[in-house]
Each structure stands twice: as structure tokens, then as C-alpha cells.
Image (tube, grey):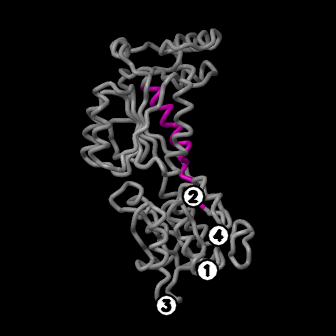
Amino acid sequence: MPSHSNPTITTIAESAGVSIASVSRVLNGLPVRDATERKVLAAAQSLGYVPNSVARSLKSSRTNQVAFAIEDIGNPVYLAMLREIQPVLKQAGYRLVLHSTGADLDEELEVLRGLGQRYADGLIISPIRVTPEHLAELERATAPVVVIGSLPDGSPVDNVRADSRTGVEMALRHLRDLGRRRIGFVNGPLDTVPGRSRDAAFRAGMRRWGMVLDEDLVHVGAFRRRTGAEATRALLAGDAAAHPDALLCANDLIALGALDVLRERGLRVPEEVAVVGMDDTDLAAASWPALTSVSLGSAERGRRAAQLLLDRLADPGSGREPRVVTVEPSLHVRASTGGDRVADDGAAPR
């Protein structure tokens, strides 16, 4: 008797003791070692796996390509995702096609519509805005799609998301425990998924940890380094008593811009102003001072998205309900909040 009523590529991989990519290669008729093939086929038979015949006939025109659509190829968050997605797909026999959309709605919708032209067998997309037009195209998608980023409940595709709310609360608790009370918040656009969720999390977190939210210390711009610089200059204008003693930045790029201006003004970090970023990209550990940052699991989100897509590609006609995976955040404390020793004068090391 099979042990799973609806076995997937993941359950087959667990039963066979091999990688998901190896299972995908076997089920798609790609070359693997004989021993691996025997394990996979035995596990599939034991679990009662039956490929959908209609889906298999459609796959006769497969491209062996998967598309990855992102806002900005220069953003280190997407690079972290890419470094995980590409090897997982490559091992399963797929090439990766990259689209940098610039967050342009028409460009993103065209990527989704283009699946009907069979330019790729599947798509991973990470839009920073999710509109009714996105949801309509996801409903009509003719190939498997996985979205990295939050979608409304009941959305028709697999979804890998971050827990920004918990991440922001971690950062605020850390700053509160350090004795910081005038906390500034520099965010990206509020009409984006991350901007909206991080704004809500900041407001909820300030209430939860019993701190007074000063709207004069909240700045909204873009998820860019220049926004951090512009916001910090504005927040440091006027009476010194009204200046923030900490800055929570909605991503690491914003935080780097804030650090640029704090150095420019001769303010010591973290003694006078502590700084926390979000995303924990490679830039965080490489900055001066090294940046405390909330990891939202960019690499893990990329890896999980690739695995979900391989599941769908192995049996796209299964009719399985869309899955939602949430990757938990973690706080990485570094010198910008006192996690490491910092030169007394705040100068960069020689």
C-alpha cells in the first residue's frame, strides 16, 4: 500500500534518500547514475506515484528552461536567491533565463503571458507589487509558477514568503534592549509589498515594545542607497535633541546610505546613532562599521522556490493545492549596534 495519498517529488526524494533534483531528472527522462535511477523508481512505485498522462504529453515540447523574473539584477537580495536557484535547477537539467523587469507592471505581465508561447517550462517571479492584473495572469498561467513574496490568501500558485513582521520586531526589541528610544525608520515605497508590510510591522513593533512612535522620524523613499542618505540628512536637521538615537532601515542598501551620512557628519556609530538594516546581504558584513541586519532568508527563499517549481514540473497536471512556505527571519548583530568592537572615533580601520 502506498504511504502517501498524493506523493510529490519531495516525498519521493525523502523516501529514496536522494536529492529533489535527482528525482526530477529521473522522472523527466534525463541521465542519472543507474543506482540513483533504481532508488527513485522503487520509491515512486512504493509511494504509488502515477504521472499525469496529459501533463506528460504536453511536456513533449518542453524547453528545459526556467525563467526567473526580478525587479533589479543589481540588488544583492536577488543575487542571493539566484545563487541558490541556479544550481538546484541545473542539477535537474534546466537552464535558467533571467528577466530584470525594473518593477514595470507591463513587463511583469508580459513575462507571465509569455509562458503561453512556451519560452520556458516554468517561472519563478518576485514582484515587489502585486496587483489584480498580476493575480489574473497567475490564474491564467499555462505553465507552473512560483512567486517569491507575499500573495493574498487563496492565490492560485505556490508562494514562498518572508516574515517581515517578526524580523522588524526582532530589530526593535534589540534596539530597545540597548536603551534606544528615538528610533527613526527609513522605508521604501508604501505601495509595494515589502514597504507596506515593513511599515505595518514597525508601527506594531513600536507599540508592542512600549516605545513612542514619532512620525517626524519616519521617512519613505525608494529601496536605494540614496534614500538612506537623503533620509538621514533630513532626520539630522534642526535641533539635536530631536535627532534619532537609532535608525531602522527597510533594507541594507538604505542602511548603507545612512552610514555614509553619519560618517560624513562625524557621528559615531553606534555610540551616537545605532543602525540596523534588513535582508542581511553580503554588503552588511562588508560595510564599515559592519552592519547589524535582519536576515529574511533570501537564499533559503530562492532554494525553496526552486524546489517547489521542480515539484510542479515533475507532475504539472496533478491538481495539487497551491503551497505557501514562510521562511523565518534571524537577527545578525554586528558593530553598527555594538555587536563588535568599534574604533572610539568611528573611523574606518586602515
* Residue 79 location (% of width, % of height): 52, 45
Q: CA distance from mark 3 to mark 1?
A: 15 Å
Q: Which residue position holds label 2?
A: 294
Q: What residue is at 42 percent from the left and 36 percent from the top?
A: 124
Tag 4: amino acid: Thr
Residue 54 within the magenta-colored segment of the rendering: no
Within 10 Å of the Cα at label 1, are there few (<14), some (14-19), or many (20+) other Cα atoms? Answer: some
Q: Which residue position holds label 1?
A: 267
Tag 2–tag 4 contact (CB < 8 Å): no
Q: Is residue 40 left or right of residue 207?
A: right
* Residue 87 location (% of width, % of height): 57, 31
Within 10 Å of the Cα at label 2, are there few (<14), some (14-19), or many (20+) other Cα atoms? Answer: many
Q: Nearer the viewer, mark 4 or mark 1?
A: 1
Q: Which residue position holds label 4?
A: 337
Q: Nearer the viewer, mark 1 or mark 2?
A: 1
Q: Residue furthest front?
A: 350
Residue 308 in view, yes or no:
yes
Q: Is tag 3's residue or tag 2's residue first in the polypeptide sequence?
A: 3
User: What is the secondary structure assignment of the residue under circle 1?
Assistant: loop
Tag 2: amino acid: Val
